[in-house]
Image (spheres, rainbow, N blue to C red):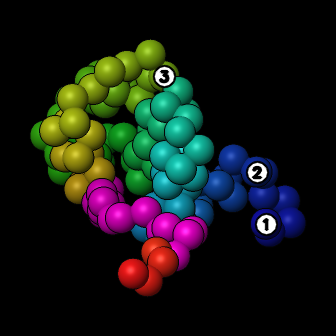
Amino acid sequence: MAKGTSFNEDLTAKLRDPEFASHYLMAAIVDNDLDFLPIALGDIAKAHGMSKLAETSGINRRTLYKVFDKDANPSFELVTQIMDHLGLSLEVKPKNKSKKKKAS
């Protein structure tokens, strides 16, 4: 963090980087923190600018702010649309198995 930079300013700057933003969002998913997940996505959206996101996505600003509330229950389609406009995507992959299968 640069001298004279607040934590929030530093976080906002880092969240503009898609790689950092993806790790930030994945931390909530991996920790199964469903209360923090919309907040994390909202933090990323705010870092990119809510007006810009509303304009590029076609989603009204009021709706965006509601989506990022911890009590919101947005549709999967809406979340993926927002993520797409933030330069993020979801990826599903198999879990790593810690135990190796025994040879038969």
**What secondary structure characterizes most of the magenta part?**
loop
What amino acid does circle 2 point to?
Answer: Phe
> Residue at position x 53%, y 62% from top?
23
Badges 2 and 1: C-beta atoms under 8 Å apart?
A: yes
Please tell me which residue is depicted at 76% across the width and 51% down the height of the picture: 7
Say if the magenta span includes residue 101.
no
Question: As shown in the figure, which amino acid type bears the numbered disc 1?
Answer: Met
Q: Quadrant of the C terminus?
A: bottom left
Please tell me whether mark 1 or mark 3 is closer to you in this view.
Answer: 3
Q: Which span of residues is magenta-colored? A: 86-100
Q: Quadrant of residue 92?
A: bottom left
Up the image or down, 78 lies above or below 80; here it is above
**Residue under pointer 1:** 1
The type of residue carrying mark 3 is Lys
Looking at marks 1 and 3 on the same chain, the residue that comes earlier in the sequence is marked by 1
Q: Quadrant of residue 66?
A: top left
Q: Percent position (x, y) of residue 78?
A: 20, 36
Crowdedness near tag 1: few (<14), some (14–19) or many (≥20) residues, C-alpha within 10 Å: few
**In front of the other: 82 or 76:** 76
Q: Residue furthest bottom?
A: 103
Residue located at (58% from left, 61% from top): 13
Left or right of 1, for residue 20: left
Mark 2 or 1 closer to N-term? 1
Secondary element under disc 1, as helix, strand or loop, is: loop
Q: Which residue is mark 2?
A: 7
- Determine which of the numbered discs, if any, sits on residue 70 in the image: 3
The answer to whether residue 76 is left or right of residue 102 is left
In the rendered image, residue 14, in percent from the top left (x then y), is placed at: 59, 63
Could you give the CA–CA distance between mark 1 and mark 3, rounded to whole angstroms?
28 Å
Q: Which of the two discs, 3 and 2, sits closer to the camera?
A: 3
What is the spatial separation of the Cα atoms under label 2 and label 1, in whole angstroms? 8 Å
The answer to whether residue 102 is above or below residue 6 is below
